[in-house]
Amino acid sequence: MDIISQLQEQVNSVAALAFNTFGTLQRDAPPVKLSPNYPEPPSNPTEDSANFADQPKLMSAALVKAAKQFDALVAALPSSEGGEEAQLRRIAELQAENDAVGQELQKQLEAAEKELKQVQELFSQAADNCLNLKKPD
């Protein structure tokens, strides 16, 4: 798999981890009193509330690990050698090569179309000759 695909997968992984982390924190967070004007929120102590203290640590560790893997992939990207001028020169070279190949392909296409016309004419003549050889009953 190429580096760009790996980066895309890693971004998706980081996004999924962040989404799951925020959703879990939102779902499992204990209620908090917002103001003295509001009644005390009901507390529902469950078995999961004991694990809630560990969840943010585990999820943040997974998120940090995924982010570090992403950073390692970014560091593995090839650097741009020679700066912008070298890149522009390389683009110009590739464009010239592309134009030359395009012209060659255009010539081949024209030759193929010419040959196709010749084959169609020969086929038409052969079909006419076959029809002329048959005698009406």
Image: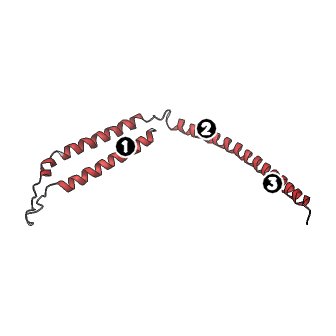
| Marked residue nearer the N-terminal end (3 or 2) | 2
| Marked residue nearer the N-terminal end (1 or 3) | 1
Circles 1, 2 touching at the beta carbon (< 8 Å): no
Q: Position of residue 71 (x, y in %)?
A: 35, 38
Q: Which amino acid does label 2 sit on?
A: Glu
Residue lying at 34% horizontally and 38% vertically, measured from the top left: 69
Residue lying at 60% horizontally and 39% vertically, measured from the top left: 94
In the picture, which quadrant includes the C terminus? Answer: bottom right
Q: What element carries label 1?
A: helix
Q: In this view, does 30 lie to the left or right of 109?
A: left
Circles 3, 2 touching at the beta carbon (< 8 Å): no
Residue 10 tag number:
1
Residue lying at 70% horizontally and 44% vertically, measured from the top left: 105
Q: What residue type is labelled 1?
A: Gln
Q: Is residue 34 left or right of residue 88?
A: left
Residue lying at 37% horizontally and 43% vertically, measured from the top left: 10
Q: Quadrant of residue 32?
A: bottom left
What residue sits right under mark 2 in the picture? 93
Judge the density around disc 1: few (<14), some (14-19), many (≥20) Cα neighbours within 10 Å.
some
Q: In this view, does 76 lie above or below 113?
A: above
Q: Where is residue 7 in the image (x, y as percent from the top left)?
A: 40, 42
Q: Is 92 or 14 nearer to us in this picture? A: 14
Q: Is 131 or 102 nearer to us in this picture? A: 131
What residue sits right under mark 3 in the picture? 120
Circles 1, 3 touching at the beta carbon (< 8 Å): no
Q: Position of residue 6 (x, y in %)?
A: 41, 41
**Disc 3 or disc 2, which is closer to the eye?**
3
Q: In this view, does 36 lie above or below 22?
A: below
Q: What element carries label 3?
A: helix
